[in-house]
Amino acid sequence: DRTTDAMFPTPAAPNIVKGFAKIGYRTIGIGGVQWFNDKFITSNFWGKYYFSEFYWNEDYSETCFNAFENQINKVKDLNLNHLKKPIFLFLNISSTHEPYMGFGESVEAQKKAFEYVDKHLPRLFDFLPSEFVLMLLSDHGECFGEDDLWGHGFYHPKIMEVPFAYLEV
């Protein structure tokens, strides 16, 4: 049973990923932050229950300063741009997560991390097929002094504001 009024590609789907699979999309997930590491019981379900393919490794995580480039290289290795079948690609970008690629812990550091992602984003599109749905997202928001709070290890409305982009072509 659904607990949301969110619209999925097909009403018979329990979530957006399964919805795209039901209408013929190849569903691919590439995790970023270490939370997606399948050694954790809370994270080892992505490939089993959601995506037809799910990838994560340490080189995609927030501890790797060129993580987004590594994720793009994974997309390139999947050789998707020659497919006739449409894809649904979920990409969790860890580069904008603390420690912000080693730039420090500040608004300016996160801004530099976003600039890094923006710089490399066009390369990602070179490796996508002619028909795709792309979800780029963080795993949570961040407090930068709101209510005198910093970071994300607690509840605050700013932490619930997840940076997210959706593109359908």
Image: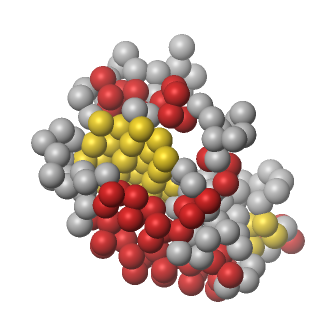
Left or right: 132, with 72 as reference point = left
Seen from the viewer's position, the closer of residues 92 and 150 is 92
Quarter where residue 57 is shown: bottom right
Q: Which residue appears farthest toward the front when viewing the image? A: 77
Looking at the picture, how far across and down is residue 74, in whole percent? Answer: 40, 58
In the displayed structure, would residue 93 be above or below residue 105?
Answer: above
Looking at the picture, how far across and down is residue 158, in whole percent? Answer: 69, 59
Looking at the picture, how far across and down is residue 109, in whole percent? Answer: 65, 83
Residue for point 31% across, 61% down: 76
Where the N terminus falls, by quadrant? top right
Q: Does residue 163 appear in the picture of this structure?
A: no
In the displayed structure, would residue 69 be above or below residue 45?
Answer: below
In the displayed structure, would residue 37 be above or below residue 15?
Answer: below
Residue for point 24% across, 29% down: 24
Q: Which residue appears farthest toward the right when viewing the image? A: 148
Residue for point 69% across, 41% down: 39
Seen from the viewer's position, the closer of residues 11 and 40 is 40
How was this image coloured?
A: secondary structure
Residue for point 31% across, 52% down: 78
Left or right: 53, with 140 as reference point = left
Quarter where residue 112 is shown: bottom right
Left or right: 52, with 106 as reference point = left
Seen from the viewer's position, the closer of residues 164 and 50 is 50
Q: Does residue 34 appear in the picture of this structure?
A: yes
